[in-house]
Image: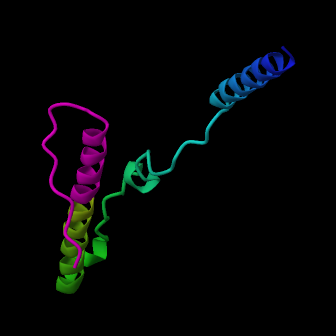
């Protein structure tokens, strides 16, 4: 009888330990959430008043606006794919960019 009592005590201890470990708080996984950079709003480039007289400054401003648009489109694509993996319906996300 002593071995049955010891076996039951060991089993009860194992069950309580497994239940207690399930109640422990777990740190959020950083891969689960979107990047903080994807949640930041990039300000629009500002055209300096002096740039009206400079063709090079206007070209640089156009390039900055175009590059910002490309970065925002990539950001929205990443967020779209994140919510798609979370199960949100009705999304039509662009494919991720190919390396290289």
> Could one spot residue 52 in this view of the protein?
no
Magenta span contains residue 37: no
Work out whether residue 29 or residue 37 is closer to the camera in this orientation and state it.
Answer: 29
Q: Residue at x 40, y 48 (%)?
A: 34
Work out whether residue 13 or residue 72 is closer to the camera in this orientation and state it.
Answer: 13
Magenta span contains residue 97: yes
Q: Position of residue 45 (x, y in %)?
A: 31, 65
Where's the C terminus, which quadrant?
A: bottom left
Q: Residue at x 27, y 33 (%)?
A: 87
Q: Residue at x 44, y 45 (%)?
A: 32
What scheme was used to colour the molecule?
Answer: rainbow
Residue 21 left/right relative to 44: right
Residue 8 left/right relative to 95: right
Residue 22 left/right relative to 12: left
Quarter-of-image position of residue 99: bottom left
Task: Magenta stretch: give its range.
Answer: 72-100
Quarter-of-image position of residue 97: bottom left
> Could one spot residue 18 in this view of the protein?
yes
Quarter-of-image position of residue 71: bottom left
Work out whether residue 63 or residue 84 is closer to the camera in this orientation and state it.
Answer: 84
Q: Position of residue 9 (x, y in %)?
A: 80, 20
Where's the N terminus, which quadrant?
A: top right
* Count of marks overlaid on the render: 0
Q: Residue at x 16, y 38 (%)?
A: 91
């Amino acid at each position: 009888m002593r071995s049955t009592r010891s076996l039951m005590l060991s089993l009860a201890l194992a069950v309580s330990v497994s239940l207690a470990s399930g109640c422990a708080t777990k740190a959020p996984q950083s891969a689960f959430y979107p990047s903080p950079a994807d949640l930041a709003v990039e300000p629009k480039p500002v055209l300096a008043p002096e740039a009206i007289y400079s063709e090079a400054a206007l070209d640089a401003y156009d390039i900055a606006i175009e590059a910002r648009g490309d970065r925002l489109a990539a950001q929205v694509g990443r967020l779209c794919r994140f919510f798609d993996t979370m199960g949100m319906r009705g999304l039509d996300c662009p494919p991720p960019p190919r390396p290289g």
